[in-house]
């Protein structure tokens, strides 16, 4: 199979939590079995975890241990956001802020044995990371090629001010120059990230990556607005108020 490897989603380490999150009463046992088989055939790359309110903090530690046992390269934890399927499910299924902090504290010790990747967890540090659009592409079922899956999902939220086609470079079924189209697409040439007074006056403006434009779109704002969900300066002001 060449250099093909597989990521597997695992959202809890009990049937009650994982199955409730997925809506499939048989999902947990099948998923665990599949992970073991992929590991045996050296096809497993990582475990993808969505922290949720149905799983206990202890389960995330067990997921890390399970990933190590099955020789996964990483465990990537990405919470529910208000885009894609998360629009309807975030309020009832997303892990609360306090739980997210506890999950990070409980699992960070495993970084000595496996890479633990935390996506959009509670943050108190600047500068923010930069956008990876164009580096990790996404191919939709109809053949459309997106520079980022999350940008596409975000445009489908009810309050989006951007159109999906802004982030589609072409279609692999109809365009033979997809590679060239991807190379020519530069998000920073089309939009000014951090185009707001908060960022412009920040002492770390030049060093900051401005966070995730998809999150900005999902919040009902245009690219250029501040990624307030993870900006510690904005969050500190909100808590003071």
Image (cartoon, helix red, strand yellow):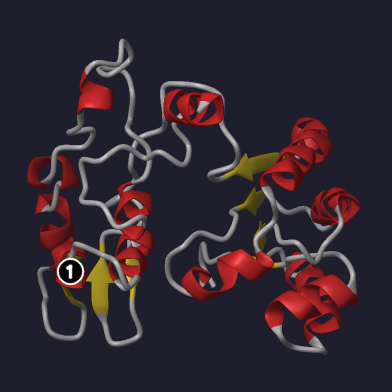
Q: Is residue 137 left or right of residue 4?
A: left
Disc 1 on helix, strand or loop?
Answer: loop
Q: Position of residue 49 (x, y in %)?
A: 68, 59
**Could you tell me which quadrant the N terminus lies in?**
bottom right
Q: Considering depth in this image, is 220 or 184 the residue closer to the camera?
A: 220
Residue located 59% across and 41% down the image: 121
For mark 1, does the 10 Å Cα neighbourhood hold few (<14), some (14 to 19), or many (20 or more) residues? Answer: some
Q: Considering depth in this image, is 118 or 135 the residue closer to the camera?
A: 118
Task: Decide if residue 23 is in sight here.
Answer: yes
Residue 16 lies in what quarter of the image? bottom right
Residue 112 lies in what quarter of the image? top right
Q: Is residue 139 left or right of residue 234?
A: left
Q: Position of residue 21 (x, y in %)?
A: 72, 75
Residue located 86% across and 81% down the image: 29
Task: Decide if residue 6 is in sight here.
Answer: no
The residue that mark 1 highlights is 163
């Amino acid at each position: 199979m060449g250099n093909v490897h597989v990521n597997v989603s695992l959202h809890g380490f009990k049937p009650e939590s994982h199955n409730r999150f997925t809506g499939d009463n048989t999902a947990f046992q099948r998923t665990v079995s599949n992970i073991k088989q992929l590991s045996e055939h050296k096809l497993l790359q990582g475990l993808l975890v969505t922290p949720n309110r149905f799983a206990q903090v202890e389960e995330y530690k067990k997921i890390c241990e399970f990933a190590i046992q099955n020789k996964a390269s990483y465990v990537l934890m990405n919470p529910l956001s208000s885009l894609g399927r998360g629009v309807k499910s975030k309020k009832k299924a997303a892990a609360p802020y306090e739980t997210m902090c506890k999950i990070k504290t409980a699992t960070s010790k495993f970084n000595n044995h496996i890479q633990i990747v935390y996506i959009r967890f509670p943050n108190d540090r600047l500068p923010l990371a930069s956008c990876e659009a164009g580096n990790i592409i996404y191919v939709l079922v109809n053949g459309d090629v997106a520079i980022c899956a999350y940008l596409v999902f975000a445009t489908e939220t009810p309050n989006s001010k951007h159109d999906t086609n802004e982030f589609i470079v072409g279609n692999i079924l109809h365009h033979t120059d997809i590679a060239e189209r991807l190379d020519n697409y530069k998000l920073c040439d089309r939009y000014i990230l951090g185009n707001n007074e908060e960022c412009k006056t920040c002492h770390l403006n030049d060093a900051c990556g401005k966070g995730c434009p998809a999150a900005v779109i999902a919040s009902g704002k245009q690219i250029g607005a501040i990624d307030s969900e993870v900006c510690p300066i904005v969050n500190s002001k909100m808590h003071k108020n």
